[in-house]
Image (spheres, rainbow, N blue to C red):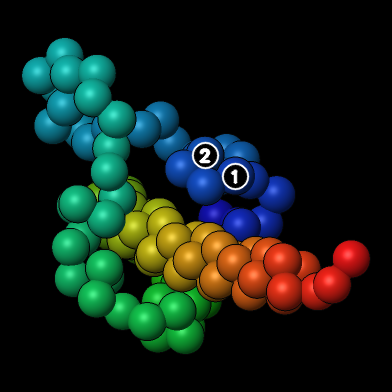
Amino acid sequence: MKAAGAGRGPGEPAEGAPPTGTAEQAEAGGTESFDPVAAHPEVAELDYEQARDELADVVKRLEAGGLSLEESLALWERGEALATVCERHLAGAQERVDQALQSVQEDEPE
């Protein structure tokens, strides 16, 4: 799993990511995409630093190995939710910076 925003756009799966959707959706023949934050609503309340730190822990645990397939998949899905939360915070911060810059540019005499 890559760190949040590393070489991918918001909502795009990480390189090598499993297909979107849950195992239950696949078994039921569902084609709806997997919404990682909806699957882990508790992460939506985290601020950027909390989500980033937890994501780093998830990556370390996955890289260390020794987990069952189910544990790995559950951890991967949580990591995707955390990465999505981080990306949303970063997008919000970028929007604030863009608005501030636009405001300064509008206030400058020509």
Question: Residue beneath label 1, please?
Answer: 9
Toward which corner of the image does residue 58 lie, by quadrant?
bottom left
**Element under label 1?**
loop
Q: Is residue 101 above or below residue 75?
A: below
Q: Which of the pair 106/69 is nearer the observer?
A: 106
Along the line of sight, the residue nearer the viewer: 28 or 6: 6
Q: Residue at x 47, y 85 (%)?
A: 49
Contact, mark 1 vs mark 2 (Cβ under 8 Å): yes
Using the image, tell me which numbered label, if any, was put on residue 12: 2
Quarter in which the N terminus is drawn: bottom right
Task: Look at 23% across and 36% down and name the residue there.
Answer: 22
Q: Residue at x 13, y 32 (%)?
A: 24
- Looking at the image, residue 84 lies above or below residue 92: above
Residue 90 horizontal side relative to residue 77, left or right: right
Q: Residue furthest right?
A: 110
The answer to whether any part of residue 79 appears in the image is: no
Q: Amino acid at mark 2?
A: Glu
Q: Is residue 93 left or right of residue 78?
A: right
Towards the viewer: 101 or 71: 101
- 107 or 65: nearer the viewer: 107
Distance (Cα) linking label 1 and label 2: 5 Å
